[in-house]
Amino acid sequence: MQVGVYEVGRSKSKVIVIDDFLRNAQDAVDAAAAVPAFPPETRTGYPGRRHQIGPADKASLCVMDILKGAGPLIQSQYGVDNFRVFEASFSLVTTPPAEMSHRQRIPHYDWDDPNYLAIMLHLHRVPDTGTAFYRHVASDLEQVSGGAASRLGRRVQAEIAECRPGPDAHYEKLFQVEGRFNRLVIYQGCLLHSGYFPPEFNYSSDPRAGRLTANIFIQTAKNSG
């Protein structure tokens, strides 16, 4: 494994990037391909399809492998004692830009709590796609926590009303991580971020051809004893 730890923006929020993460990454692809169909994601703004991985799912072994490998780094780099998993899934981006809502086309945050982390393992070989991190110019926010959520929400609502498309109008890109096969990315869910895709992106719903990722969301705890 090759590990990189990057401090993003003025907040110096850590983003961990690990290449050649799993010894059996192709097994995870095979497990995703064995799923009959990924249902459309309706609970969040994710622009595609997701298969939720439960404890009885065969793919839960992949989730355990990811957590075992990433756990020590999470504890040391984020200064936490332990964590709990509250969601795991296989995900595929399948919604073309023309069918996305405005909010799906701009950077977002997952939770307004820095103790929640996103863990994403790229299981595809689709080029020129990945995750970028941003600062919202008008509010000067790079990460969203506490009362900042309502402040950002009011600003974004006003900007949507202006009908200026794309993230470049109101956001400054701080850092990006290209998606590569068997690359793991860990970051705080309160960071403003967005996926990026090339013009020729295929938006395939086939796990063997599309932008397949394994996504795990955890809540961390410090000084828990």
Image: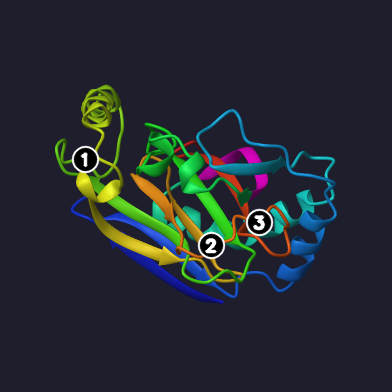
215 relative to 64 in the view: left or right: left
Residue 21, disc: none
CA distance separating discs 3 and 2: 9 Å
Circle 2/circle 1 CB separation < 8 Å: no
Circle 1/circle 3 CB separation < 8 Å: no
Numbered disc 2: secondary structure: loop
From the image, tell me which residue sits under label 1. Answer: 141
On screen, 196 above or below 2?
A: above
- Which three-letter amino acid code belongs to the residue tagged 2? Phe
- Which three-letter amino acid code belongs to the residue tagged 3? Ser
| 53 and 208: which is toward the camera | 208
Give the quarter of the figure containing the N terminus. bottom right
Residue 204, disc: 3
CA distance separating discs 1 and 3: 33 Å
| 33 and 109: which is toward the camera | 33
Badge 1 or badge 3: first in the primary sequence: 1
Residue at coordinates 22% horizontally, 55% vertically from top-left? 9
**Mark 3, residues whose alpha carbon is within 10 Å: few (<14), some, or many (≥20)?**
some
Q: Please provide percent x and percent y for residue 95.
A: 56, 45
Q: Nearer the viewer, mark 2 or mark 1?
A: 2
Numbered disc 3: secondary structure: loop
189 relative to 72 in the view: left or right: left
From the image, tell me which residue sits under label 2. Answer: 201
Q: Please provide percent x and percent y for residue 223.
A: 44, 39
- Which three-letter amino acid code belongs to the residue tagged 1? Leu
